[in-house]
């Protein structure tokens, strides 16, 4: 979003990353070596700065193909796109991930995208019915 409007940056305490299940063991090894202990709480893999850290401050792992909170299977990490000095997934994939998890902070991020014109009514046709309903709900009642 900051590429569209620098003032629209919103910081969160946690970070979500999308990983293929086959890459999870290598990720666990790399993050552990870097000093971020791995834990699995309620089926969610995460990394924290120290063993007593809150899940709210964690790096949460979303697995490609997993279904989150009644959504669709998480999309693949390909195709990737470049954004400044890092690689990311396309906006359509990020929106799908946020519609899948649909936690309050995901809803706020989606509302930000809507307010910036990054996501408009044409996006409704990109998703299956139940994700479309979630997006339409946010578009119709942004103050929810």
Image (tube, helix red, strand yellow):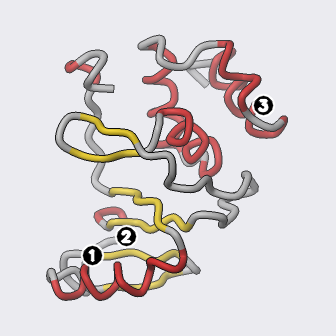
Identify the mark nearer the N-term, 2 or 1: 1
* Residue located farthest toward the front when viewing the structure as drawn: 79
The percent position of residue 59, horizontal first and vertical second, equals 33, 66
In which image quadrant can residue 34 be found?
bottom left
Q: What residue is rendered at 47% in x and 18% in y? A: 118
Asked whether disc 3 touches disc 1, contact meaning CB atoms under 8 Å apart, the reply is no
Give above or below for 26 relative to 102.
Answer: below
Identify the mark nearer the N-term, 3 or 1: 1
Give the secondary structure at mark 1.
loop
Q: Residues within 10 Å of mark 1 (few under 14, many from 20)?
A: many
Give above or below for 69 relative to 20.
Answer: above
Q: What residue is rendered at 61% in x and 53% in y? A: 75
Q: Residues within 10 Å of mark 2 (few under 14, many from 20)?
A: some
In which image quadrant can residue 82 be found?
top left
* Residue located farthest toward the right when viewing the structure as drawn: 129
Q: Residues within 10 Å of mark 3 (few under 14, many from 20)?
A: some
Residue for badge 2: 55
Nearer the observer, 2 or 134: 2
Residue for badge 3: 133
Asked whether disc 2 touches disc 3, contact meaning CB atoms under 8 Å apart, the reply is no
In which image quadrant can residue 36 be found?
bottom left
Give the secondary structure at mark 3.
helix
Q: What residue is rendered at 33% in x and 26% in y? A: 1
Left or right: residue 115 versus residue 52 is right
Left or right: residue 143 versus residue 135 is left
């Amino acid at each position: 979003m900051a590429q569209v409007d620098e003032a629209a940056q919103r910081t969160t305490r946690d970070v979500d990353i999308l990983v293929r299940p086959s890459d999870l063991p290598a990720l666990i090894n790399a993050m552990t070596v870097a000093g971020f202990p791995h834990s699995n709480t309620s089926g969610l893999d995460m990394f924290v700065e120290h063993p007593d850290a809150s899940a709210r401050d964690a790096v949460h792992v979303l697995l490609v193909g997993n279904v989150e909170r009644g959504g669709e299977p998480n999309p693949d990490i390909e195709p990737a796109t470049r954004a400044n000095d890092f690689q990311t997934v396309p906006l359509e994939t990020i929106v799908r991930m946020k519609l899948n998890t649909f936690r309050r902070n995901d809803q706020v991020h989606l509302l930000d995208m809507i307010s910036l014109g990054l996501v408009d009514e044409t996006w409704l046709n990109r998703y299956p019915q139940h994700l479309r309903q979630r997006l339409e709900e946010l578009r119709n009642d942004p103050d929810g």
